[in-house]
Amino acid sequence: MRAVVQRVARGSVTVEGSVRGEVERGLVVLLGVGRGDTDDDAGYLADKVANMRIFEDGQGKMNLSVLDVKGSVLAVSQFTLYGDCRKGRRPGFSGAAPPEEARRLFELFVKELEKYGLKVATGVFREHMTVEIINDGPVTLLLDSKKNF
């Protein structure tokens, strides 16, 4: 499972002209589910996202988590994080999980975040979405449950 995590001042996702999820101060997480990912991967990434210290404290050091700052999370499913661009000019997506399994693990990731008491908004699975991200910092991090990076 892979995630692009961005610290944001604001984020929203719109589907067919209607805002479906939005957050103020917090995180936008673009989440890709890969073939072979398990419930453990969802739990690992949820724990990492909830507790990662990427918000500044009073001294300007990144010492606080989204929990500490009482922020929220906008989670958006994004299978393209498994796009393989090493060969040719069109990405291949054979590394992405099948849609049914990806949906189940995405929803589990959201539930795991909610167990921490976080407010979690989401996009709409398998729909075309417009995602607005006002990155704060900017702070953008890559996570991989298999620890490939």
Image: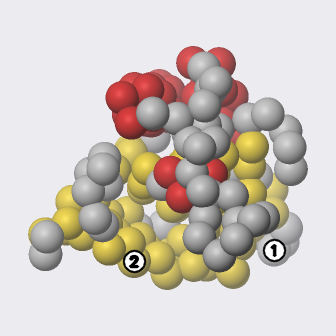
The image's mark for residue 60 is 1
Q: Residue at x 69, y 58 (%)?
A: 84
Give the residue displayed 30% in from the left and 67% down from the top: 129
Label 2: how many Cα within 10 Å (few below 14, some 14–19, many 20+) = few
Determine which residue is flagged by label 2: 132
Q: What x and y, as percent, mark residue 108?
A: 45, 26
Q: Residue at x 52, y 35 (%)?
A: 97
Question: In the picture provided, is 137 more to the left or to the right than 9?
Answer: right
- Estimate the spatial distance between the alpha carbons at disc 1 and disc 2, rounded to whole Å: 26 Å
Residue 111 screen position, x and y as percent = 42, 28
Q: Secondary structure at mark 2?
A: strand
Seen from the viewer's position, the closer of residues 22 and 60 is 22
Front one among 114 and 58? 114
Q: Residue furthest top?
A: 39
The answer to whether any part of residue 66 appears in the image is: no
What's the amino acid at mark 2?
Answer: Glu
Quadrant for the N terminus, please: top right
